[in-house]
Image (cartoon, rainbow, N blue to C red):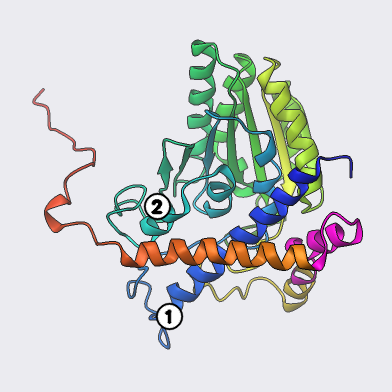
């Protein structure tokens, strides 16, 4: 692999951190919701969408980023947020609804926002695409070489926001990269039942921009494609659309029975777990040895445990703060 060793190792470390974080969130999410699943109960009430298996789509862009670059993500955002460098302590605290969280405990896991680094996500399908176009337009006006990245699922490629955002980004030649995470299912609907073409990357041609398909859930392949797309945007050559075939190892949300995917499908999917596959590749090529990998896994475990401890030790927001830091509407007499 003709990639700097520190980049290869950084991607592995980040993948391990993402997976460990989501495993711990999953454990604590279910700890007090069973035996009868109660979505409103426990330390982490509400829905929870985890990205186990989709780590490569996030870490492949990481070495190409610079300070000030903007990223928008989906309702399944943890992997992208961690790869972007969002504070893990504050992120965990937000998920637990604590005062020390990114949004002071008021946004929850689908509405993470961080000024440093420049990251945001939303539970609204396709919402991040026009936001990324706006960020890219701001970079243009400021005269910086920063880029905006917008992550979305393959289901969102059928939203109007997808087409409007690609059209404007191409028309104005903005520094934005659109990244489609194709995990084959929009909730329980298979892609073939909702989308007229096999590959959304082909849709880029309608807007006169490059469309690239990454056919494997491989951080190295993502690294190479994203490197080119981000460099293209930085030098002022306009937007790109990158589609990445990936796997959602767990259900759409925690508590999802996942009966719409066959056991054979899920078995094959788990056999190509990207962390195991990539780790074995690094071992085989001598980038890491067993001791290195054990050290990385322990370090990432410790980082995650520290974040969980920080979150659980943090206070809940005071009841009287319920109306602070929120947008309030005002009626107007016409």
Magenta-tinted stretch? 270-290
Residue 273 visible (yes or no)? no
- Report x, y in % for residue 89: 43, 55
Which comes sooner in the sequence, label 2 or label 1? Answer: 1
Residue 304 visible (yes or no)? yes
Q: Residue 204 versus residue 104: which sits nearer the camera?
A: 104
Q: Residue at x 74, y 43 (%)?
A: 7
| Secondary element type, mark 2 | helix
- Report x, y in % for residue 41: 32, 75
Whether 238 is drawn above or below 287: the answer is above
Whether 160 is drawn above or below 34: the answer is above
Q: Residue at x 11, y 53 (%)?
A: 320
Q: Residue furthest left?
A: 333
Q: Which residue is mark 1?
A: 31
Q: Which residue is mark 2?
A: 90
Give yes or no for residue 285 being in the magenta stretch.
yes
| Secondary element type, mark 1 | loop
Quarter assignment of residue 187: bottom right
Whether 127 is drawn above or below 41: the answer is above
Q: Whole-Å distance between the Cαs marked 2 and 1?
A: 21 Å
The numbered mark at residue 222 is none
Q: Residue at x 34, y 51 (%)?
A: 107
Query: Which callout, 2 or 1, points to the residue nearer the camera?
Result: 2
Location of the C terminus by quadrant is top left
- Report x, y in % for residue 256: 53, 72
Quarter assignment of residue 265: bottom right
Mark 2 crowd level (few <14, some 14–19, many ≥20, 10 Å Cα) = many
Question: Which secondary structure dominates the residues rendered in magenta?
Answer: helix
């Amino acid at each position: 692999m003709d990639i700097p060793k520190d980049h290869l190792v950084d991607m592995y470390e980040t993948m391990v951190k993402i997976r460990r974080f989501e495993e711990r969130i999953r454990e604590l999410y279910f700890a007090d919701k069973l035996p009868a699943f109660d979505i409103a109960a426990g330390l982490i009430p509400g829905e929870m969408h985890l990205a186990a298996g989709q780590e490569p789509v996030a870490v492949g862009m990481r070495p190409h980023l610079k300070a000030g670059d903007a990223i928008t993500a989906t309702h399944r955002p943890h992997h992208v947020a961690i790869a972007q460098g969002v504070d893990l302590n504050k992120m965990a605290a937000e998920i637990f609804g604590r005062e020390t969280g990114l949004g002071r405990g008021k946004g929850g896991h689908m509405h993470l926002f961080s000024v440093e680094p420049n990251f945001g996500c939303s539970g609204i399908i396709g919402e991040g695409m026009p936001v990324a176009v706006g960020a890219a337009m701001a970079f243009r006006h400021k005269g910086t070489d920063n880029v905006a990245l917008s992550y979305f699922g393959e289901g969102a490629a059928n939203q109007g926001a997808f087409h409007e955002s690609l059209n404007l980004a191409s028309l104005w030649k903005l520094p934005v990269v659109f990244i489609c995470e194709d995990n084959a299912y929009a909730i329980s609907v298979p892609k073939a039942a909702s989308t007229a073409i096999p590959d959304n990357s082909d849709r880029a041609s309608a807007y006169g921009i490059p469309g690239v398909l990454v056919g494997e859930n491989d951080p190295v392949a993502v690294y190479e494609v994203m490197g080119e797309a981000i460099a293209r945007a930085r030098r002022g050559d306009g937007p790109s659309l990158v589609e990445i075939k990936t796997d959602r190892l767990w259900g759409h949300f925690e508590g999802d029975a996942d009966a719409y995917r066959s056991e054979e499908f899920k078995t094959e999917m788990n056999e190509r777990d990207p962390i195991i596959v990539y780790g074995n590749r690094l071992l085989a090529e001598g980038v890491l040895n067993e001791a290195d990998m054990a050290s990385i896994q322990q370090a990432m475990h410790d980082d995650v445990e520290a974040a969980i401890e920080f979150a659980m030790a943090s206070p809940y927001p005071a009841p009287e703060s319920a109306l602070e830091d929120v947008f309030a509407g005002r009626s107007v007499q016409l």
